[in-house]
């Protein structure tokens, strides 16, 4: 008898960034078990009213392209396919035999609050917290933390009298742009701070953090919009918060992953390593076993090659994920999980809305529950769900309701130096890299400051062939670049050839939407040539 195709429809959210836009995921399962997904618009979503950015439209690629195999994700133990139960047992044994002080647990917010809470309980069994890569929280004074978690509705943004953009909504958070344009239609003045001259701007500044207070004049009716991510500069975030406090303006911080806000809130009482510190501790042998939950360290690493070398020094790398790719293939123990849209649970978006992930599977949660039980931590999904609601301050997931932020989130007095060094990601289709000759002065070369425009494509490792590095016309003419050609970028003894386009950006800046394998440090001087 021929088995018919089956279609499942999930009212879900986009995992691309912390706005968590609403959408429908249509999952088609063939008679042979092969799965494909497509995206439909959900106009009833108050976050995005059915609109999606380019990344949202590419979710079918996100859910399928990273999987390097034609068959479904399988759990693995030491390079061999394994039943899920055997992989869980192997993970439990690895955690049991490793010294507790050598264990680390890592999750950036690519999963639900319930899984994150269960993961925290597992880490707590060893006296550890969950690392999120957001060292910024431990690097700022504790009195500023309430502002970091403040949130505000996008509808409220439309009523602002002034909007100060420390992000580029065109490339980083496109759904935000619609709200800014509405605010402008309502009479708001839009002030943009950054190297790109944005069409929406009434005023444009390219400033250092120490210049914000002198050059910018927000009022109580203003909104300051910035973002927090693993490479955030604490001086920049502190300057934005100081400006908001001095003026009485609202601050609104966007985040790179769907549940970055929920993950940060659930980890607010724990000290956080920066990504640099995490890899430093792996290299030194302080961390010997690492458990990563739905987080790809190669995509996040400040330096991809250095990360590969560091990860090879671990005694055990445990990865629980729904994706397949280079990082999951590095795992000593790979625990297969369901894709994000199938997960049962909640996500806290940047506005403060508690949203349902849309699925009905607790497979990933059950894995963490089983592991925690092996170390004396007993809980079930409903009890953890209740704890999540209590921490967030809401009784249920309701996309039309907002949490009321607490006054204060204490942190460890010990401070880490935050990482400000994005590293090279996967090579894109228009990029080739090779070792260069020793650096020397070149009459046909010019230097520029490297600025990253960090977007969901970069954070999630989805190739975006429409992404080019950007230079202004003056620099293009100075270098003698040819339309449709490439520009050579050199730093740290390496050179990369990248396609470029002409944009209205500041003199002396090179803007890149992807991490370049020549320097992981934004703001560093790179050498450009034809």
Image: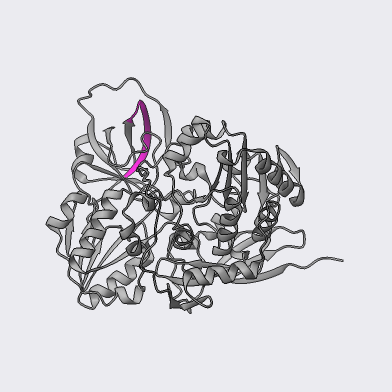
User: Within the magenta stretch, is there residue 251?
Assistant: no
Give the magenta range: 491-500
Q: Foreground: 517 or 338?
A: 338
Residue at the image point whose x is 47% and y is 32% from the top: 306
Is residue 441 something one can see in this rendering?
yes
Residue 275: x and y, percent? 44, 43
Position of residue 291 relative to residue 224, above or below, is above
Residue at horizontal 44%, vertical 55%? 456
Which quarter of the figure is the N terminus placed in?
Answer: bottom right
**In the rendered image, the vertical position of residue 366 relative to residue 248, given as above or below:** above
Question: How would you classify the magenta stretch by its main secondary structure?
Answer: strand
Q: Position of residue 305 (x, y in %)?
A: 48, 33
Quadrant assignment for the C terminus: top left
The x, y position of residue 226, in whole percent, is 31, 59
Residue 494 magenta-drawn?
yes
Q: Is residue 239 above or below residue 470?
A: below
Residue at figure coordinates x 68%, y 45% from the top left: 91
Please tell me how many numbered marks the rendered image carries: 0
Q: Is residue 357 visible?
A: no
Q: Nearer the viewer, residue 260 or 29?
A: 260
Q: Position of residue 134 (x, y in %)?
A: 42, 51
Question: Which picture quadrant has residue 416?
Answer: top left
| Chosen colour scheme | one colour
Q: Residue furthest right?
A: 1
User: Is 249 on the left or on the right of 25, as rendered?
Assistant: left
Q: Residue furthest left?
A: 214
């Amino acid at each position: 008898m021929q088995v018919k195709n089956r279609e499942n429809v999930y009212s879900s959210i986009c995992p691309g960034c912390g706005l968590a836009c609403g959408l429908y995921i249509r999952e088609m399962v063939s008679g042979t078990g092969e799965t494909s997904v497509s995206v439909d618009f959900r106009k009833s979503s108050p976050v995005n009213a059915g609109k999606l950015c380019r990344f949202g439209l590419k979710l079918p690629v996100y859910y399928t392209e990273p999987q390097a195999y034609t068959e479904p994700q399988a759990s693995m133990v030491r390079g061999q396919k394994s039943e899920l139960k055997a992989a869980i047992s192997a993970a439990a044994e690895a955690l049991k035999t490793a010294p507790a002080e050598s264990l680390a647990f890592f999750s950036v917010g690519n999963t639900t609050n319930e899984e994150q809470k269960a993961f925290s309980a597992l880490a707590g069994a060893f006296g550890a917290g969950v690392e999120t890569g957001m060292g910024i929280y431990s690097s700022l004074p504790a009195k500023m933390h309430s502002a970091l978690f403040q949130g505000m509705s996008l509808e409220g943004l439309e009523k602002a009298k002034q909007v100060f953009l420390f992000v580029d909504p065109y490339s980083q958070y496109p759904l935000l742009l619609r709200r800014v344009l509405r605010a402008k239609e309502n009479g708001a003045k839009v002030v943009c701070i950054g190297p790109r001259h944005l069409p929406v701007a009434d005023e444009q500044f390219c400033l250092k953090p120490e210049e914000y207070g002198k050059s910018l004049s927000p009022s109580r009716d203003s909104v300051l919009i910035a973002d927090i991510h693993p490479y955030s500069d604490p001086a920049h975030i502190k300057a934005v918060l100081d400006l908001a406090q001095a003026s009485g303006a609202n601050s609104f911080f966007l985040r790179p992953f769907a549940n970055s806000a929920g993950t940060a809130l659930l980890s607010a009482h724990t000290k956080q390593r920066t990504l640099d510190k995490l890899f430093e501790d792996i290299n030194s042998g302080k961390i010997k076993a690492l458990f990563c939950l739905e987080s790809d360290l190669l995509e996040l690493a400040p330096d991809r090659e250095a990360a590969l070398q560091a990860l090879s020094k671990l005694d055990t790398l445990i990865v629980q994920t729904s994706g397949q790719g280079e990082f999951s293939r590095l795992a000593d123990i790979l625990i297969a999980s369901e894709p994000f849209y199938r997960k049962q649970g909640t996500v806290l978006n940047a506005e403060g809305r508690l949203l349902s992930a849309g699925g009905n599977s607790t497979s990933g949660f059950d894995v963490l529950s089983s592991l925690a039980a092996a170390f004396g931590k007993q809980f079930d999904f409903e009890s953890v769900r209740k704890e999540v609601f209590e921490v967030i301050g809401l009784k249920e997931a309701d996309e039309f309701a907002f949490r009321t932020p607490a006054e204060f989130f204490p942190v460890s007095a010990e401070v880490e130096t935050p990482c400000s060094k994005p590293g090279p990601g996967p090579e894109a289709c228009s990029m080739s890299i090779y070792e260069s000759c020793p650096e020397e002065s070149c009459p046909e070369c010019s230097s520029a400051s490297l600025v990253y425009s960090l977007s969901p494509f970069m954070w999630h490792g989805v190739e975006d062939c429409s992404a080019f590095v950007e230079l202004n016309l003056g620099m293009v003419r100075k270098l003698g670049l040819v339309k449709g050609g490439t520009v050579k970028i050199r730093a740290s003894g390496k050179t990369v050839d990248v396609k470029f386009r002409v944009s209205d950006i500041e003199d002396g800046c090179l803007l890149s939407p992807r991490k370049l394998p020549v320097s992981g440090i934004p703001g560093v001087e790179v050498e450009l040539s034809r």
